[in-house]
Amino acid sequence: MADFRALLISPYHDLVDVAREVAPDYPELEVTVHEGDLSKGLAAALGSIDSDFDVVISRGGTAQMLEDELSLPVIEIDVSATDLLEALARHNPQGRRTAVIGFSNALRAVSEVADFSDFDLDVYGVSFEDELPIVLEDVASGDYEVILCDSFSRDACAERGMTAHLLSSGARSVSDALRRALDLCQQTREVRTQNHVLWQLVRSLPPRVALFSGSGRLVYTNLTERRPELLGYLREHLGGEKDEHLALQRGRRTYRISKSTFEQDGEAYLSFSIMTSSAPSNESLAGIERRNRDAVERSYHESVFHAVGAGEELSAQISGALRAGRPIALEGEVGTGKARIAELVYLTGPWTSRPLVTIDCPLLTDRSWGYLMDSPNSPLYGSGETLWVKAVHALDDDAARRLVDVMRQTGICERDRVIVSANDSEDATEGSVISLFVEYLRCHVLTAPPLRRRRDLRRAIGLFLDSEARHAGTVPPLVTDEAMDLLLGHPWPRNYIELRQVLQRASATTEEGVMRARDVREALDREGAARFSSLDTPSETSSIDLLRPLREIERDIVRMVVEKYGGNQTEAARTLGVSRTTIWRILKDGPCA
């Protein structure tokens, strides 16, 4: 039985055959061969690292990339002087002018031959693959009759219509690399044995682990499930806060990821601990969402609320609410930006290293409500997170009372930052449901002011038009005085939602870069035709624009009913009095406007 295990990554096919021919000469090494150039070779190495290899062997740019990415020792297969002479004899017996192209680390011996031989030979070594196009331009203008190169350079030559021959490593070069790999393994036997014991111990523990060096090199992982996708996700979060908790949902699997850092011998390391669990059915999670900090920041910064500077006006109130240390109740008319305020509370609070957990009450189904109330994995039983209970006005009195009771019994408000939000009642008074939360949870109340009360509405309009133009790469329209008077005099019953829709519609009809009164009137008339759906109390997403083709209106209604039932098309069909096939056909016809 072999004492050591070697992974040999071959950048080209012929080297595979040579390696398999030479490997039996080293019975102490169990050699596994993969074929793949550069990124493909790296993928092969990363995909095999769980197999406890002791050393990796490769050539040229592939070896160089593996050294940058892996903590395992990497042995390079050289191109020897003998390999060069054999290539010249095969492809250039007449001694014509020759260019040799490849990664510098594989061409050391070739460079020595070029310096001390009578061959008309120029060596072009590259250190990084993005240097190759520049080198090929020099070679193309150098009047060379023969080009010898590695596999990566040969592909690049072929793309430029240049004829090139592969500079192969022969059996002696491969044998030399295997010998050096064996020597290294024998010299480090004791250290590697200790490492194997530790890795086996880590592998037996429940969490999956991924360990990166400070430079982003993967040191170790025992991930097996969804390995490439998870490693890619972890690489996206190598930066940011040193200690962070992340959540990732893929299908019915939930990944809770803890990130931590430590130092060893002056070098920084980054560790990810991944716990997985089988999530309940999608219907059981309807209305329950986890978002990491980057997703929340993106949502906030892309909002009209942020574009018009509304968050700046509330910064003092938000800071006061955070200092109070109590649950926060967000009240206000529909469209006043309560969702954005909740995101801002999260982003300015102390727990941005953990996800923002949202319970969207209008989207809860019977099954997700049961999961929320009774499951030990329910966010109501978590700790150290920001929990946002959204749109509690959609709950009936019994459900609201039970939710408040569970939140009090579990002590969630002491363990988490809790935010509760609701739209004002249609008569502009505080609803009975939100009053229940405020009273029993002792909430700090923060009211989102309506748009019509902004003293700088003119400035807000300008800021939004500037933001839209900047994203579109255009110039914002000039608003005439009459058009501005119409905008300033409008009551904006749907606040920032309505502001966005009206200004976008008016901008779409402007001519010669000027927004006139007729553009604003048409946009306001169009907005006036929108009616709230009867699914629940008014919300930011529950309006239907009636001034459109009937087919589009029908599709919007079906979509809203399906969303109300958490994606359950059977329940939606029963409510609408149609078949599931009809539901599917209407939704399939195209995206809702």
Image (cartoon, helix red, strand yellow):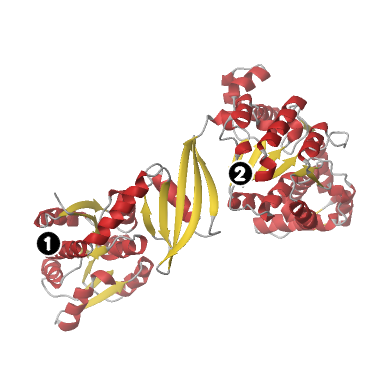
Q: Position of residue 537 (x, y in %)?
A: 78, 31
For residue 407, the mark is none
Q: Position of residue 157 (x, y in %)?
A: 29, 64
Q: Position of residue 48 (x, y in %)?
A: 30, 50
Residue 457 visible from this viewpoint: yes
Q: Mark 1, residues whose alpha carbon is within 10 Å: few (<14), some, or many (≥20)?
A: some
Q: Nearer the viewer, residue 187 or 507?
A: 187
Residue type for callout 1? Ala
Q: What element does badge 2 sit on?
A: loop
Query: Residue 133 lies in what quarter of the image?
Result: bottom left
Q: What element does badge 1 sit on?
A: helix
Residue wearing tag 2:
383
> Residue at image x 79%, y 57%?
316
> Residue at image x 17%, y 56%?
14
Q: Nearer the viewer, residue 397 or 70?
A: 397
User: Is 342 above or below relative to 135?
Assistant: above
Residue wearing tag 1:
171
Q: Position of residue 564 (x, y in %)?
A: 66, 28
User: As drawn, is 321 to the left or to the right of 188?
Assistant: right
Q: Nearer the viewer, residue 132 or 47?
A: 47
Residue type for callout 2? Ser
Q: Nearer the viewer, residue 189 or 26?
A: 189
User: As drawn, is 395 to the left or to the right of 111?
Assistant: right
Query: Residue 459 lies in what quarter of the image?
Result: bottom right
Query: Residues under labels 2 and 1: Cα distance?
Result: 61 Å
Task: Mark 2 vs mark 1: give the one in front.
Answer: 2
